[in-house]
Image: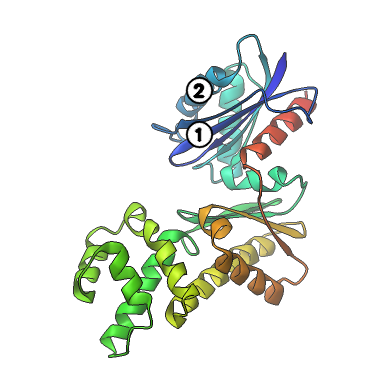
Amino acid sequence: MKVVVGADVGGTKLAVRVAPLDDPAAPPRADRTLPADGWEAAPVDTAARWLLERLTRAVPEGDEIAAVGIGAQGCDTQRHCAHLAAAVEALGVPAAVVNDAALLVPAAGLDTGIGVIAGTGSIGVGADAAGVLGDEGGAPAIVRDAVRSALAAYDAGRADDGLLAALLGHFGDPDPQTLARTVNDQPTPGHWGPAAPAVFRAADAGSALAAAVVDEAGRQLALLVTRLVGRGAVGDTVVAAGSVVVRQPRLADALRARLAAVHPSLTLRLLDVPPVAGAVALARARHRTD
């Protein structure tokens, strides 16, 4: 059977979906999640070999790859994506390559729109516009800003409204001074990011400081959209994905409210299917061009 293969390559995992070429409504032939150990988007020749070694292993025996669609972390310019696609095709497989955030719009079944990911970091991608990278609105940035806010309130002699206690509880620190050292001595996304749920719980419990941090994260994500619109992004839907914005309604609501204020023509949609579905759609589109 001829199949198309989609790949969503992130910082820690590779999602692969194999689907029948001639029947888009049929269930996938295979869905696999593999470690992304060793993934680097450059040099492109090495990246192409890394990808095909793993994609071909995911294809059921006897199936033939007609085309692949790839959303890859680290492919942050159209030029880079085109070079990686050419490197994959040089190995004998028709390919389309985009940044992983660009999978969101086709995964949602749309031809145009703006994709926003808020997870470990944040990125926005829109049709007819280059991507915009950042960390604002992602989990580590939310925790960083929450720690700053809680410690500033403590230094000013203000009573804890629940945010400081939430952070102390997460990190297991006995006092604000130890919290400052804990956070500053290991300023990595892997250390900061897991504390984000504590910030949201504090906001839900009534902490004004935590709520303000979340509102600012929503504003920063909306700013990514504003930058993309200014660069020519088209469409009337913002498709959002990533663990933070999808799992934390308060952040999604903050982003939705900010978009309504500054871009009333745009609608926010939380992606409810795996982004790799967009890679399969890209693979189908690539095959149609042959």
CA–CA distance in space, label 2 to label 1? 9 Å
Please indicate, yes or no, whether residue 33 appears anywhere in the rendered image.
yes
- In terms of depth relative to the viewer, which is nearer, 277 or 91? 277
Please indicate, yes or no, whether residue 289 appears anywhere in the rendered image.
no
Which amino acid is tagged 1? Leu
Task: Examine the rendered structure and indicate whether residue 23 appears above or below residue 235.
Answer: above
Circle 1 is placed at which residue position?
14
Say whether residue 191 is left or right of residue 16.
left
Find residue 3 and report its image quarter.
top right
Residue at image position (57%, 17%) is 91
Q: Residues within 10 Å of mark 1 (few under 14, many from 20)?
A: many
Residue at the extreme top of the image, as rendered? 62
- Quadrant of the snapshot with the C terminus: top right
| Residue 120 in picture, x, y percent from top left | 45, 53
Q: Secondary structure at mark 2?
A: helix
Circle 2 is placed at which residue position?
54
Say whether residue 139 is left or right of residue 55.
left
Q: Secondary structure at mark 1?
A: strand
| Residue 229 in picture, x, y percent from top left | 69, 63
Say whether residue 266 is left or right of residue 211.
right
Residue at the extreme front of the image, as rendered? 205
Task: Examine the rendered structure and indicate whether residue 28 appears above or below residue 219.
Answer: above
Which amino acid is tagged 2? Arg
Find residue 30 and report its image quarter.
top right
Residue at image position (55%, 23%) is 55
Residue at image position (72%, 13%) is 1
Q: Residues within 10 Å of mark 2 (few under 14, many from 20)?
A: some
| Residue 28 in picture, x, y percent from top left | 68, 27
**Mark 2 vs 1: CB contact within 8 A:** yes
